[in-house]
Image (cartoon, rainbow, N blue to C red):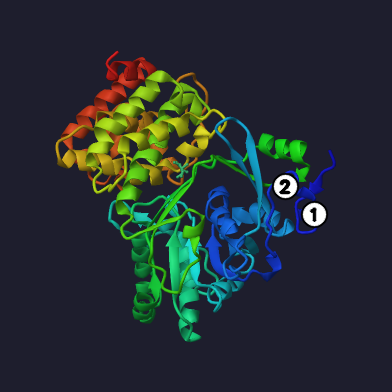
């Protein structure tokens, strides 16, 4: 098959192999600046927006994708060469692949190379929304203090070099300042990360930074910037070399970085957009008054479920989430965790059938075509556990309820942090707190509570005797018998 590089020039050649943008991309203005152009954004917001742009009356909501970090150079270069185009490959439940070339990213910027271009773009009159996927860790929140972490060297850098920032907080501050100076309207800053109250969190963290960096900007920000909370969902594994080759071989589309994802998608947002928004509801986005219950449900069932499968699966020697989910004992363990520990602390889910939701999660996790990498799921667990798993534990502790499964997973994580699985294979621990995790994991061999002493993750959990008892028992059991035997026992077989 003849292959062609994916770019504007060749776009029409792919019409038979994939759905392609039918709108005139050169007419689309940039209404959204998005920071963090990894797989998730491209499978989710950029996909929804591409769908909407097919309505020819919509011309104001193109996306400018910003690569914020040094190592984002690769995705920036790829998108630049491909004129912002990429292929979204949906791995359907029957194993077939649906391919769609997405056209909604109409511009790209690489922040480390040209910080002022990013600030100016965010401050340009046509931009009404800045959306973020900067990962859970990107919000610079310290779990132990509940506050913004000013000790972060990058934050120190931004305070000292306001015109050439490195963090999102430095950029947003400068952009808002410029908007104010230019007499422009405010805008919406919208988080698309997996954080409980992600809009509230963004506001709180940004406000802390601005209070220190540009205190006179605070009242303007309070009056002119909105921060809607949102629940985002679509499982998007890292793209593998096989995905890239398979796309070329089956379609001739030479795309250096396609995105692969599951068919399911969901986006529930609070309708609080101070300068307007795209009519995303036309393409399946739900707008609600209070998204908090939905966020809780997703974070504590789906994301926590991922962490359960990831950490247990990693120790057991599995590589992908579906392998762990299709092990009957692990599956039963996860089901019981969801039923006995998470479901009782979820409330206000007006009209949501929780059992059906749990069943759909088990089906999504078990999808053998997705091949979501356990390494991806376990990466940055130090930022994930406090949001995904520990809120359930804390809520259960308050009502003297169940947390045995959660304590077991935390113990498994302590053992995982030693960096070797139960078959003796090295684990790829990728975590901003890797060295602390390892140090505490080693200390835990003699005294398992050492792991819980990482206050920035666990807060005061080590002072809760009933949790500690359950955790220590699990720790010793896993070390002695291995994960599989332990969960058989917990499952009551
Ligand atoms: C995952 C999420 O990062 C993780 O640990 O749980 O990336 C998950 O796949 C998405 O939130 C799905 O919407």
Q: Is 396 rendered above or below residue 334?
A: below
Who's the residue at 50% across and 28% down the image? Answer: 322
Q: Looking at this rendering, what residue extends furthest in the right direction?
A: 2
- In the drawing, does residue 257 fall left or right of residue 267? right
Q: Position of residue 165 (x, y in %)?
A: 52, 68
Residue 255's disc is 2
The answer to whether residue 156 is visible is no
Q: Position of residue 269 (x, y in %)?
A: 40, 58
Location of the N terminus (image quadrant): top right
Nearest to the observer: residue 197 or residue 384: 197
Q: Where, by quadrant of the figure, is residue 416 drawn? A: top left
Location of the C terminus (image quadrant): top left
- In the drawing, does residue 94 fall left or right of residue 139? right
The answer to whether residue 357 is visible is yes
Who's the residue at 38% across and 18% down the image? Answer: 484
Q: Nearer the viewer, mark 1 or mark 2?
A: 1
Q: Where, by quadrant of the figure, is residue 80 drawn? A: bottom right
Nearest to the observer: residue 35 or residue 296: 296
Mark 1 element type: loop
Q: Is 328 rendered above or below residue 43?
A: above
- In the drawing, does residue 372 fall left or right of residue 453? right
Residue assigned mark 1: 10
Mark 2 element type: loop
What crowding class fits label 1: few (fewer than 14 Cα within 10 Å), some (14-19), or many (20 or more)?
A: few
| Comes first in the chain, label 1 or label 2 | 1
Residue 162's disc is none
Q: Position of residue 28 (x, y in %)?
A: 64, 69
What crowding class fits label 2: few (fewer than 14 Cα within 10 Å), some (14-19), or many (20 or more)?
A: many
């Amino acid at each position: 098959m003849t292959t062609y590089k994916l770019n504007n020039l060749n776009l029409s050649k792919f019409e038979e192999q994939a759905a392609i943008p039918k709108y005139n991309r050169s007419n689309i203005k940039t209404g959204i600046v998005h920071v963090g152009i990894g797989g998730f954004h491209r499978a989710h917001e950029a996909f929804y927006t591409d769908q909407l742009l097919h309505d020819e009356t919509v011309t104001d909501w193109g996306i400018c994708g910003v690569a914020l970090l040094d190592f984002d150079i690769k995705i920036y270069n790829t998108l630049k060469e491909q004129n912002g185009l990429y292929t979204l490959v949906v791995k359907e439940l029957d194993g077939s692949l649906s391919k769609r070339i997405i056209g909604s990213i109409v511009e790209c910027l690489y922040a480390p190379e040209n910080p002022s271009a990013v600030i100016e773009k965010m401050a340009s009159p046509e931009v009404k929304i800045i959306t973020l996927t900067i990962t859970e860790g990107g919000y610079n929140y310290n779990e132990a203090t509940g506050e913004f972490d000013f000790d972060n060297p990058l934050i120190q850098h931004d305070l000292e070099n306001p015109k050439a920032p490195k963090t999102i907080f430095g950029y947003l501050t400068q952009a808002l300042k410029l908007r104010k100076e230019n007499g422009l309207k405010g805008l919406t800053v919208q988080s698309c990360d997996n954080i409980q109250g992600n809009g509230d969190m963004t506001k709180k963290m940004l406000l802390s930074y601005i209070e220190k960096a540009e205190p006179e900007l605070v009242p303007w920000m309070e009056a002119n910037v909105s921060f809607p909370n949102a629940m985002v969902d679509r499982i998007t594994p890292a793209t593998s070399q096989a995905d890239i080759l398979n796309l070329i071989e089956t379609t001739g589309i030479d795309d250096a970085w396609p995105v692969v994802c599951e068919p399911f998608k969901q986006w529930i947002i609070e309708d609080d957009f101070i300068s307007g928004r795209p009519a995303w509801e036309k393409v399946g986005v739900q707008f609600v008054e209070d998204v908090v219950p939905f966020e809780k449900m997703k974070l504590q069932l789906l994301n926590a479920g991922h962490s359960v499968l990831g950490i247990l699966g990693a120790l057991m020697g599995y590589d992908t989430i579906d392998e762990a989910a299709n092990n009957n004992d692990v599956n039963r363990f996860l089901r019981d965790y969801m039923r006995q520990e998470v479901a009782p602390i979820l409330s206000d889910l007006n009209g949501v059938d929780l059992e059906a939701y749990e069943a759909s999660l088990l089906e999504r996790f078990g999808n053998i075509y997705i091949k979501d990498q356990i390494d991806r799921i376990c990466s940055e667990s130090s930022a994930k556990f406090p949001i995904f798993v520990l809120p359930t534990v804390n809520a259960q502790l308050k009502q003297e309820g169940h947390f045995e499964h959660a304590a077991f997973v935390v113990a498994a994580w302590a053992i995982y942090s030693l960096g070797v699985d139960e078959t003796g294979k090295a684990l790829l621990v990728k975590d901003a707190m890797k060295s602390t995790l390892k140090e505490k994991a080693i200390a835990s061999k003699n005294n398992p509570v050492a792991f819980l002493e990482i206050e920035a993750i666990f807060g005061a959990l080590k002072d809760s005797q009933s949790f500690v008892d359950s955790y220590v028992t699990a720790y010793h059991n896993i070390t002695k018998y291995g994960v599989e035997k332990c969960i058989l026992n917990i499952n009551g077989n």
